Image: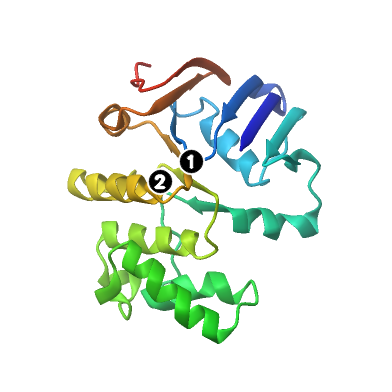
Amino acid sequence: MIEIQGITKIYPPNIVALRDVQLSIKGGEFVSIVGQSGSGKTTLAKMLIAEEQPDEGKILISGWDITRIRRHEIPSLRRQIGMVFQDFKLLPKKTAFENVAFALEVSGASNEKIKNIVPQVLKIVGLSDKTNRYPRQLSGGQQQRAAIARALVHRPKILIADEPTGNLDSIHTKEIVELLLKINEFGTTVILVTHNKEVVNSLKRRVISIDSGQILLDKEEGRYII
């Protein structure tokens, strides 16, 4: 599914974000990428959606070399890869339904498709009774659920969650982690980027530890030990 081959990224003047990273992630895996702030984990996540490009190396997604991606191909890539962030990025003047629908509207989906898909993904994330609520009327956990629903509308093969619980309390954190596991059970590859030790250690899934731009540890059913 994902093959990362010798990725190096250096920002001016001489800041090494990633150095010679080799990594393989199979379809359907649930992988945690962990490390402290500045370790390179977020840079790696950005490269998977072509927001950043490496200075050296290749990234293959289902055989597609995205390090050579053309600008007009990026929307197609991002329909295959859902992305969830720490700060939700919901539009404040749109309801939960409208926020999720917007992701389909910008890709040219028909009204019929929107009316069919949006209720489905809102049901998956447990927001069927909150469709007409605005972000300010939702709890932090509910806002993140809406953001996850938005990331699911194109039925992506991969879901990248970059610090998705960073703004949440322990109860809502647990709910979001359970939701990510549920999505993974549907067959979606889930990549969780985090520095939350408790979350990672509770999962008992594959853990990839990054420090100073290099992989220190890659272990099945691992723990966050940095």
- Where in the figure is residue 218, as x and y percent of width and height? 48, 18
- Where in the figure is residue 41, as x and y percent of width and height? 52, 31
- Where in the figure is residue 4, as x and y percent of width and height? 66, 29
Local SS, label 2: helix
Q: Quadrant of the N terminus?
A: top right
Q: Nearer the viewer, residue 147 or 140?
A: 147
134 left or right of 117 in image: left
Q: Quadrant of residue 13?
A: top right
Residue 93 visible in the picture: no
Q: Nearer the viewer, residue 109 or 88?
A: 109
The amino acid on which the numbered mark 1 sits, given as a three-letter code, is Gly
The residue furthest bottom is 111
Report how far apart the C-alphas of labels 1 and 2 lie in the structure.
Answer: 7 Å
Image label count: 2
Q: In the rendered structure, find residue 184 and report the number of the disc placed on it.
A: 2
Depicted 115 relative to depicted 59: above or below: below
The residue beneath circle 1 is 28
The amino acid on which the numbered mark 2 sits, given as a three-letter code, is Asn
